Image: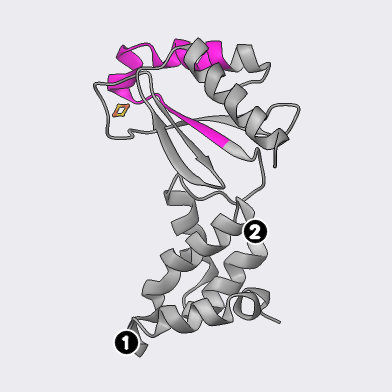
Amino acid sequence: MNQTAIKYAREIEALFAKYPEEHRQSAVMPLLHLVHQDNSFISKHAINDIAEIVGISTTEVASVVGFYTLYHDHPEGKYRFQICTDLSCALQGADEFLRALCAALEIDPGGTTKDGLITVEEVMCLAACDKGPLFQVQGKDGISYHERQTVESAMQTVQELREQEKHE
Ligand code: FES
């Protein structure tokens, strides 16, 4: 049984109304977005379901998930701090920033804090190459960008998220 098709029946109908029958595979991105927004990751099961819904292979859907840094195929922290360590940012100290932030959070790069709230990961260029070190925070409320960061300013963002979580 296709749980994704059942759960998002209305949304899928609305999405398919936008595409001609022969281009239904174009709905793969909005469908992935829908599932990701709800769960913070896209499970193998959901990948199979989406492939079946839009009529492409599971491998094709999985490769879309793998290509975009905004999609994840396994659960991690509720918020992802995605630090750009691409060349321009590396020249502005992104690697040192990544290591120092991870040390402050007592995790390794790619790891998740003990409270399960923050995952820190490296990503490629975020298109603000002169404003490093920088990261984007991907969470349940969408994405926010944090430019010209220090460990102190990043930890301030962590603290704000921890406070926010306490009140939810
Ligand atoms: S190299 Fe980091 S934003 Fe482009």
x then y, percent, for residue 163: 66, 28
Residue 25 forms part of the magenta stretch: no
Of pointers 1 and 2, the one earlier in the residue sequence: 1
Q: Which residue occupies the foreground of this view, 62 or 13? A: 13
Q: Which numbered marker is on residue 43?
A: 2
Q: Which residue occupies the foreground of this view, 73 or 161? A: 161
What's under tag 2, amino acid-wise?
Ser
Q: Quadrant of the N terminus?
A: bottom right
Q: Residue at x 42, y 78 (%)?
A: 15
x then y, percent, for residue 67: 42, 50
Segment colored magenta = 80-101
Residue 85 forms part of the magenta stretch: yes
Which residue position is annotated with label 1?
Answer: 20
- In the rendered structure, the answer to whether residue 23 lies left or right of residue 39 reads left
x then y, percent, for residue 146: 40, 27
Q: Is mark 1 within 8 Å of ligand 1?
A: no
What whole-number distance in Å separates the C-alpha atoms at marks 1 and 2? 28 Å
What is the quadrant of residue 118 in the picture? top right
What is the quadrant of residue 134 in the picture? top left
For mark 1, give the secondary structure: loop
